[in-house]
Image (tube, rainbow, N blue to C red):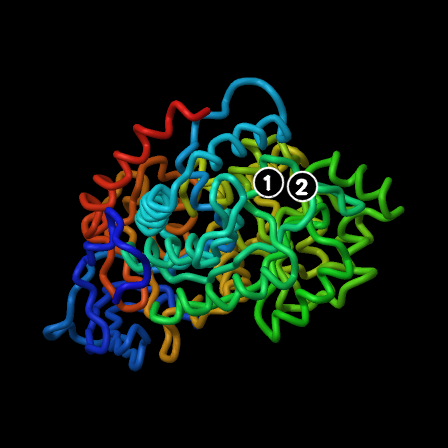
Amino acid sequence: MRIVNATPLAKYRPGFQTGEMERYFLPRALLPDGWARDVLLTVADGTVTALHSGAAAGNAVRLSGVALPGMPNLHSHAFQRGMAGLAQRGGDFWSWREVMYRFQAALAPDDIEAIAAIAYMEMLEAGFTAVAEFHYVHHAPDGTAYANPAELSARIAAAAETSGIGLTMLPVFYAHGSFNAMPPTPGQRRFVNDIDSYARLLDGTARAIAALPDAQLGIAPHSLRAATIPELGQLVQLAAGRVLHIHIAEQTLEVDDCLAATGQRPVEHLLANIAVDHRWCLVHATHMTVAETTALAATGAVAGLCPITEADLGDGVFPAIAWREASGRFGIGTDSNTAISATQELRLLEYSQRLQHRTRNLLAPSGISSGRYLWDQAVGGGTQALNRPVGAIAPGRRADFVVIDPAHPALLGRDEDTLLDAVTFAAATPCITDVVAGGRHVVRDGRHVARDAILSAYQRTAHRLVDTI
């Protein structure tokens, strides 16, 4: 398959086979109804077609360890992986954003593909088997459209193909620089579309991802700063049943600006004007009142939490206790990709609550394993937000799972939920040995099967870009 022009990565495909049947034997696995032993999976076209526990391995591929459902990553800006660690001097979120603007202005299409491929490779090695890519760099550095308006979306699709990660593509609508339809700044010119040009971008993106196994397409208004309420209404019509993701209430200045412009707080303003439902993912939602929290949870929308990025940018702490009490759903994302780790995101989510409330094991119901609760909730919320048939090791679901090494020093002697506690809170070094995504064995012995080729392409990009900021 050829979906983009020749690039450093386009010639490489890591030998993934589709259309063939594979069988995997899992000595221990977390299934929808609990822990099971000696699980035999039959996989065809990336989907689990049969499952038997208490089975013999036979000639199946034996993955020694403990298998967990793969974690969906519900929020990523893949290109920002290339600037990780380069914005750690002074300032606040808004000064960080200026650094990001300078960095993205230097990116050519090849760079975006190479950076996305390394980010997706690292996600797979860290336990994420699918990603929602909130992609807002669409145009050339001077703001002009490429001949193919979905050129950069196609590069994201190529990176997903090279890595083997499952993709929910979210081309971002970005029209304004701030509230009251303020004009965009020069740093935002690569992002900007009106409704008509965005519709063309959406169509081009649909074509770019069409050949990827089980790829999904969604709609992503960037924020209430970048899209007006009338535009949001038009985007809901364009969505036609697809998922919708939006940044909201991430920073206190955003809340203040929204109040000044509309007389309402961001989540309050969105809910008052748009029929939010289970298709929505509200990313961050950090600064909500109790009333906003209760009202948003009642819609069935997912809160998209990115604890590492939220801590790095000084955003604040999500009201997770109130969200849980309102029966809200959540998933986790890597956002700016400063550090990529499913377990670190979950750990920081729980630890932020412990620091704020000065007690322990806050999110899981009393007597329930915190590690098990966090993994189950994040997998379930992420599955909803990505609109992918994943989230469980079960017939009819995509064959997405990660295998944990029980011989890791932090895990010795641990079993079942206690092992998940140790994976989440005690394993400071990687403990994932194998990852299967869409039935394809993409990580073996802790390394992505295409690591050398992906890293080689990324090295050229990284060395060239380090001086841009």
Q: Is residue 353 left or right of residue 66?
A: right
**Residue bearing mark 1:** 188
Mark 2: few, some, or many residues within 10 Å (few <14, many ≥20)?
Answer: some
Q: Quadrant of residue 298?
A: bottom right
- Give residue 316's mark: none
The residue under the point 39% across, 54% down is 156
Residue identified by numbered label 2: 184
Please tell me whether mark 2 sits on a helix, a strand or a loop.
Answer: loop
Q: Residue furthest left?
A: 59
Report if the CB atoms under discs 2 and 1 are less than 8 Å apart.
yes
> Residue at 30% across / 28% down in the picture?
463
Q: Secondary structure at mark 1?
A: helix
Which residue is painted at 46% across and 68% down in the image? 206
The quarter holding residue 391 reads bottom left
Residue 333, position as x, y percentages in the image: 50, 49
What amino acid does circle 1 point to?
Answer: Gln
Q: Is residue 320 above or below residue 170?
A: above
Type of the residue with mark 2: Pro
| Residue appearing at x 37%, y 59% in the figure | 157
Looking at the rendering, in which quadrant would you find the N terminus? bottom left
Give the x, y percent position of residue 37: 28, 68
Give the left or right position of residue 394, taking residue 362 as reference.
Answer: left
Q: Residue furthest top?
A: 90
Q: Nearer the viewer, residue 176 or 49?
A: 176
Q: List x then y, in percent, for residue 302.
A: 62, 60
Instruction: For residue 299, say whether it is visible.
Output: no
